[in-house]
Amino acid sequence: MTEQEFLLKNEPHVFAQIKKSVEHERLAHAYLFEGETGTGKHQMSLWLAKRLFCTNVVANEPCNVCNNCTRIALNEHPNVQVIKPEGQTIKVDQMRRLQAEFGKKGFESKRQVFIISDAEKMNHNAANSLLKFLEEPQAGLLAILETNALGRILPTIQSRCQLIHFTPLSKGQLVESLKKQGIKEQSALLLASLTNSYEKAIEFSSDEWFNSAKDAVLTWHRYLEKADLQAFIFVQKKLVPLAKEKEQQFTLFQILLFYFRKQRQNELENKQNLQIVNQTLELILQAEQKLRANVAFQNVCEQLVLRIVRLS
């Protein structure tokens, strides 16, 4: 999928805004692209760089096949520099190398573009070095900063950039992005029900506690589905030791809701079972409210089991 196709599908408003700015030659000297991982920030950066250097622009779109477009795609164009963290941070030496590179003579055009990925990872000295760039912008120089943590970007840098917000992925888009990372569909659907953040979903998927919780709640759901009183014993035996922190307890309930909502989809043709599942979902939501009211987690879970069993 080309940058244009991705942006038209996922970020049409941002794409239209940037295209209009290019067409009318009203680009800012610095942009701050802010949004979750996977929302198209880097695709927008690459599209913009290609559009500025393309030798065969058609209908305000880069051709993607000329020498300049190809070299930008391969990160080989001398006038387009992409800065990424070296290890955990972007260091001041990287910014100095960037300044030295752009200070050389013999560039193929007067325009220069630099893209800083994960800009929130600049250390203090690197950020101050960048600030000098932004305070005294060179003619023809375009800076693009990409971040998923706007609060970690210095206010002085933010004030010198035009902020562009990228909207979170839809649930369907998030599921597809997770599946492309090798996450199975069932797990991707669960993760998308817990967060609309790609980065948070990936973090969840690799978290040992979360994977244990997912399996434990699936077992609990199976007991509850059958109105098996093993579900009562399972609370003390497995769930209480597993979820000692409040946030973890709420996560268990969110996972349980996911499994019962999936069950509801499977029971749409069976009115009697569908009614029981709907009542169960209401009981789970009520249990969540009790937990928010600081009723003990074990008590909430055990009461929930007994109330669900009584439905059968």
Image (cartoon, rainbow, N blue to C red):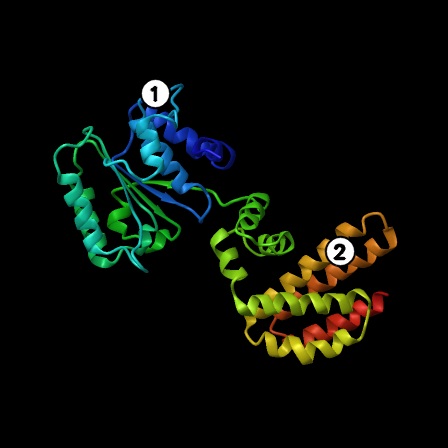
**Residue at the spot x=46%, y=34% of the render?**
7
Identify the amino acid type marked 1.
Asn
Q: Is residue 254 above or below residue 4?
A: below
Picture coordinates of residue 65 (x, y %)? 38, 26
SS for callout 2: helix
Say which residue label 2 marks: 263
Of the numbered discs 1 and 2, the one sitting upstream in the chain is 1
Q: Is residue 210 above or below residue 148?
A: below
Residue 16, disc: none
Q: Considering depth in this image, is 94 or 247 the residue closer to the camera?
A: 94
Say left or right for 139 vs 122. left
Give the crowd class for mark 2: few <14, some 14-19, many >=20 residues within 10 Å.
Answer: some
Give the crowd class for mark 1: few <14, some 14-19, many >=20 residues within 10 Å.
Answer: some
Say left or right for 265 vs 152. right
The answer to whether residue 169 is visible is yes
Q: Is residue 195 above or below residue 52?
A: below
Q: Quadrant of residue 62?
A: top left
Quadrant in which the C terminus is drawn = bottom right
